Amino acid sequence: MGAAQGMTRRLFYEDAYIDAFDAVVTACEMIVDAWSVTLDRTAFYPEGGGQPGDTGALGGVRVCDTQDGPDGEIRHITDGPLAVGTAVHGQIDWPVRFSHMQHHTGEHILSGLLHSLYGVDNVGFHMGRDTVTIDLSRELSWDELLRAEQLANETVWRDVPVRIEYPDAGALAALAYRSKKALSGAVRIVTVPGADVCACCGTHTARTGEVGIIKLLSAQRYKGGTRVWLCCGGRALKDYEAKNASVHAISALLSAKPGEVAGAAARMQRENEALRQRLSALRRQLFAYRAKEVEQGARCAVLFEEAMEPADLRHLCMALTSRCGVATVLAGGEGDRWSYAVGSEQTDVRPLGAALNETFDGRGGGKPGLVQGTLTGAREQLSHFFETYLF
């Protein structure tokens, strides 16, 4: 189904708002489990400049991705073949594309302002399914980022036009613009008045007001610089809706006003820590009382207990070692699966632990005075083992 391929007319550069078009199939070839279809013209934007390739429908098949080819052609990755020479109708997924346009324009505004404010460069840009990330060339504080966010949104609210130009060589040489690499030939310059001048191949909104809002979500140190997560437009609204619903749900659970949930959660955390410490003290008292059930000076003691946390298992075992030569505590028993602790103040218990692991398919280890682990075995078999080994 192949045919000669050539340059594809890029309708998205003529008008980024074209969401449907007609074209002729110039080539179609199978690639693994999909097809690569090229057209004489297309409104589907190919992946590039941090922006994902468009998706949509084309002549009855689904366009799952769009990529640039090596010879100026645009390859539409589809779930079915199309006959060469066929006239087809294309429809891009407009809500997805428009979101990409909002985010790409928002990224320009923010990156340009960060550069003018702090001299930092955007060294990485990725537009994901839910958020956008920008990698900056040096570390910035959250307060510095929020200052840029405020100015970026003021640019959105001014609703200024976004200009796309191809300066001639002389004008380009005299122009101060952002670019990750040196460029020559026809260079596409995107200008957001008062915010950014940048070389870019992506699609953008016609005016900044269409971005809606630029919202920073988080930031962290990354490779000597700063990685920033943000949302724009519709995604920012969805993010707010989800977080607002979460805050109101937490508000109801804590019986606190939405604006006071952080303080209420902090108080609950302090109260829980105090209760945890109190419970730990009570457990230690309980273990001390349990240990007194063992005759002082006994050669060994073996206890079978309900499931308990590893720390409690250890504490009970160590409480018993003050009363006997070798103490063993096994906790759990469901499905013959046990957690164990073996301890002694007088004897190296590691050989006993190794014997347990070998006999009962166990795993674990420790120090001379205490070993812990897990094993599998019936209680009767375990009791017989200890009677043979210890008594």
Image: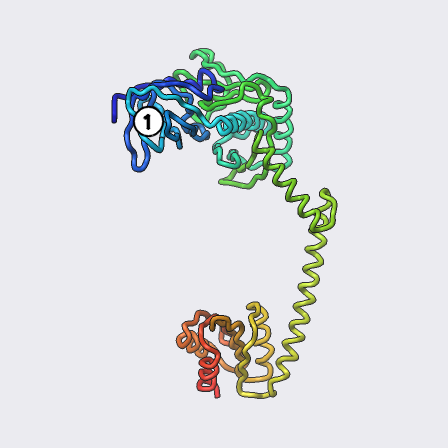
From the viewer's side, name the closer residue of 122 and 279: 279
Question: Which image quadrant for residue 187?
Answer: top left
Return the x and y of residue 260 as percentages of the image width and height. Answer: 73, 45
Residue 366 visible within the image: no
257 sits left or right of 246 in the view: right
Q: Does 71 sit above or below residue 343? A: above
Please tell me how many numbered marks the rendered image carries.
1
Q: In which quarter of the image is the N terminus?
A: top left
Q: Does 238 sit above or below residue 160? A: below
From the image, tell me which residue sits under label 1. 37
Residue 69 visible within the image: yes
Q: Does 207 sit above or below residue 346? A: above
Q: Residue furthest front?
A: 60
Question: Amino acid type of disc 1?
Answer: Val
162 sits left or right of 4 in the view: right
Q: Which residue shows up at 58% across the image and 39% down it?
A: 218
Return the x and y of residue 389 as percentages of the image width and height. Answer: 45, 85
Return the x and y of residue 83 as percentages of the image width and height. Answer: 29, 24
From the viewer's side, name the closer residue of 344 and 116: 344
Return the x and y of residue 286 as percentages of the image width and height. Answer: 66, 75
Under circle 1, the secondary element is strand
